[in-house]
Image (cartoon, helix red, strand yellow):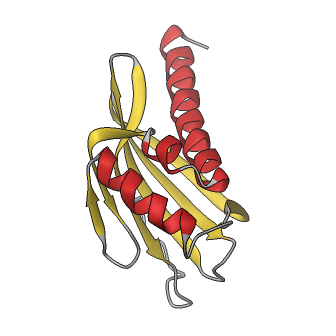
Amino acid sequence: MTLQQAAAQDETGDVQALLGRMTEAWNAGDAAAFAGQFTDEAAFVSWQGNRDSGRAAIEASHRLLFAGPLKGARMDEDGDSTVEITFLAPDVALVVVDEVRVSNSPTALVITLTAVRRGGRWRFASFQNTRKTAEATVTVTAG
């Protein structure tokens, strides 16, 4: 393994750890910890198309959600889920998580995030999730 490969593995691990912290905060219903995984200016778009602009708005909306319709809900990756991390630049990663399930919904989600590293710390600058439908079974990749 080269030094570059080792560094890439470390960075991938750092982004995976960020994703893990976000999931743990969601599962704990901790809006402050959940929002803490995002940049100050992050964009959060829900599957319904609602948009939160900034960490404070993400925290406020999730505080309401975790106290209301998402109380006790857990975010779990399905056994068939995949996590793809693609580095667009040394400090920017595209993260796609397929087949995420929230315990209070029978529908799987696809979550797309942008992770950025600032001051040595990774955080998410964007989050968007989409509900999968039965028709959404084809994935096209360039090849």
Residue at image position (53%, 19%) is: 5
Residue at image position (41%, 74%) is: 47
Is residue 37 depicted above or below 143 in this figure? above
Which image quadrant is residue 99 in?
bottom right
120 horizontally vs 80: left or right: left
Residue at image position (48%, 14%) is: 4
Which residue is more in the foreground, 5 or 79?
79
The quadrant the C terminus occupies is: bottom left
Q: How many marks?
A: 0
The quadrant the N terminus occupies is: top right
59 horizontally vs 21: left or right: left
Which residue is more in the foreground, 118 or 74?
74
Residue 67: % across, % down: 55, 66
Residue at image position (51%, 16%) is: 7
Look at the image and tell me whether residue 37 can be seen: yes
6 horizontally vs 127: left or right: right
Which residue is more in the foreground, 95 or 4?
95
Residue 60: % across, % down: 38, 56
Is residue 26 depicted above or below 73 in this figure? above
Residue lying farthest to the top in this orientation: 3
Look at the image and tell me whether residue 90 can be seen: no
